[in-house]
Amino acid sequence: MHPNVIVKRSKRRTVSLSVTKELEILVKAPMKMTDTEIGRFVEKYDKWIEKHLLMQNEKNEKAKSLIFSDEEVRMLKERARNTVMERVRHFGGLMRVEPTSVKITSAVTRWGSCSGKNSLCFSYRIILLPPELIDYIVVHELSHIRVKNHSRGFYLEVGKYLPDYKNRINGLKAAQKELGI
């Protein structure tokens, strides 16, 4: 069995397998599952584990190239603030919505968010994306001012302003993979 396997048992019925950012193999198992059964399960998925360890390692290497100095972060935040504010004004006017505030953050796991009080936050990393993807993220968050979930109605709202939003979502996924985010 792999040396870096972590087993977490809980009151679950099924067993799951994942690879963490730290290149650990995480097995979530039912309380009654024995160590021997877990060992066999891990062995059964050995090829899957190797593939995902390589993929996560590549992702980690790409992420290392996105580490910026404090000065670079300051400059990226300023560029992001200027670009995002201009796009929020543009699309907010078209959509007839206005956020209560707009902030630029250092978030790593999300491009943007909309609070229940209609305050928008965007990661400064948004500035690393092409303009059409920045526009998608801005419209996505502005749409949350009207629709607070990701229902069909939400995407109908997004589609009113960006009819090609599905292509932009695919572009965003590709960019995330390329950037290792």
Image (cartoon, rainbow, N blue to C red):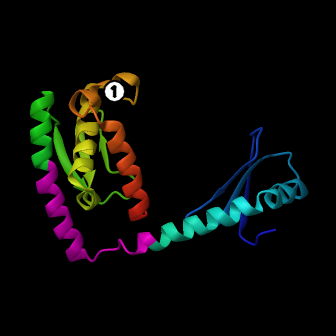
**Residue 122 on the magenta segment:** no
Q: Nearer the viewer, residue 15 or 179?
A: 179
Q: Nearer the viewer, residue 131 or 37?
A: 131
Q: How many marks?
A: 1
Instruction: Return the x and y of residue 152 as percentages of the image width and height.
Output: 39, 23
- Quadrant of the frame with the C terminus: bottom left
Quarter holding residue 81: bottom left
Which residue is rendered at x = 10% and y = 39% of the image? 90
- Quadrant of the frame with the N terminus: bottom right
Instruction: Return the x and y of residue 140 as percentages of the image width and height.
Output: 28, 38
Q: Is residue 168 left or right of residue 7?
A: left
The reply to whether residue 99 is visible in this rendering is: yes
Instruction: Return the x and y of residue 72 as percentages of the image width and height.
Output: 22, 74
**Tag 1: Cα neighbours inside 10 Å, few (<14), some, or many (≥20)?**
some
Q: Secondary structure at mark 1?
A: helix
The reply to whether residue 181 is visible in this rendering is: no
Instruction: Tell me which amino acid carries mark 1.
Output: Phe
Judged by its main secondary structure, the magenta piece is helix
Q: Nearer the viewer, residue 141 or 103?
A: 141
Q: Which residues are magenta?
A: 62-84
Instruction: Return the x and y of residue 129 as percentages of the image width and height.
Output: 27, 57
Residue wearing tag 1? 154
Q: Is residue 46 left or right of residue 90?
A: right
